[in-house]
Image (tube, rainbow, N blue to C red):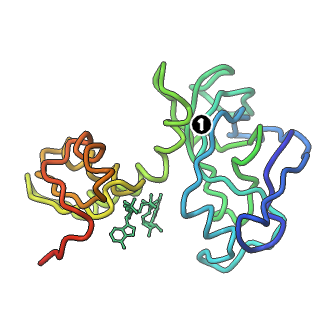
């Protein structure tokens, strides 16, 4: 298979297209044919070597968030069969260098995958796992007892965008900051009031 490898710690220039043997799913794993992989801060932090526990020594295959189809299932996997659309995480820097999703195929733990609803573009699905989970945890940690008014900064970004949507869906009144060009898009997330990013916020 083709994959993208981090050959040394550094900027995007350290990424190289390489050929690697096709992975095989182990017990509890699913072989996923990747249709889209997200680039998020976790991948960038790993590439430059700034991750908890210290850098993973290169070479390694990055890629935390993926979407694709099940190509094969390993032993002890139930509920997923070849052809199913899935999205999920290869939380590879928690596991210190497990091959990630910047590849045509990846062996992923079934527990880290979820089915993708029919018709959802894999490019969209691949943006959901870590961004969406982070946003979900934000609201969980805040543990608001009832409807509140919430300010979401960076609402045009990955985490901010999901946080704004989940907060609005949970019944909160959401005020968000965004640059002018993103104002309409942010409003479309269900945000009630959009303030210019340059606003002097008195909070
Ligand atoms: N993505 C994840 O899954 C994840 C997980 C855990 C933690 N984090 C952390 O969460 C933070 C956001 O990550 P992200 O992936 O959402 O990044 P992102 O997609 O790049 O979004 C960043 C957001 O912040 C805004 N912003 C940037 N500089 C700003 C400034 N000086 N003043 C006001 N707004 C500014 C951007 O607005 P413009 O678009 O207008 O520039 C954008 O809306 C990062 O610190 C990241 O390390 C992310």
Q: Quadrant of residue 33?
A: top right
Residue, x 74% and y 42% (percent of image)?
106
**Where is the N terminus found, in terms of image quarters?**
top right
Tell me the crowding category of disc 1: few under 14, some 14 to 19, or many 20 or more residues within 10 angstroms, Cα based. many
Work out whether 157 lies above or below 120.
Answer: below
x, y percent for residue 200: 17, 76
Q: Nearer the viewer, residue 195 or 169?
A: 195
Work out whether 52 lies above or below 136.
Answer: below
Image-based side of 105 in relation to 113, left or right: right
Residue, x 26% and y 44% (percent of image)?
184
x, y percent for residue 67: 59, 36
**Residue topped by disc 1:** 67
Image-based side of 133 in relation to 167, left or right: right
Q: Nearer the viewer, residue 110 or 71?
A: 71
Q: Is mark 1 within 8 Å of ligand 1?
A: no
**Where is the C terminus found, in terms of image quarters?**
bottom left
x, y percent for residue 103: 76, 44
Secondary element at image label 1: strand
x, y percent for residue 35: 66, 33
Work out whether 122 lies above or below 145.
Answer: above
In the displayed orientation, state which residue is furthest to the front.
181
Q: Quadrant of ligand 1?
A: bottom left
């Amino acid at each position: 298979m083709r994959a993208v490898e981090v050959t040394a710690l550094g900027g995007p220039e350290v990424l190289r297209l390489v050929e690697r043997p096709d992975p095989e799913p182990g017990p509890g794993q699913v072989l996923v044919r990747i249709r889209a992989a997200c680039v998020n801060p976790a991948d960038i932090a790993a590439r430059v070597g700034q991750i908890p526990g210290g850098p993973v020594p290169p070479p390694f295959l990055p890629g935390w968030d993926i979407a694709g189809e099940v190509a094969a299932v390993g032993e002890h996997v139930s509920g997923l069969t070849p052809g199913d659309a899935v999205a999920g995480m290869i939380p590879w820097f928690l596991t210190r260098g497990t091959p990630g999703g910047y590849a045509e195929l990846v062996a992923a733990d079934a527990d880290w995958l979820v089915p993708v609803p029919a018709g959802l573009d894999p490019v969209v699905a691949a943006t959901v796992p870590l961004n969406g989970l982070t946003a979900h945890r934000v609201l969980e940690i805040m543990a608001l007892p009832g409807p509140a008014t919430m300010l979401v900064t960076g609402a045009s970004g990955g985490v901010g965008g999901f946080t704004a949507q989940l907060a609005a869906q949970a019944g909160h009144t959401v005020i968000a900051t965004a640059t002018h060009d993103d104002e309409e898009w942010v409003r479309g997330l269900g945000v009630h009031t959009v303030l210019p990013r340059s606003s002097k916020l008195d909070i």
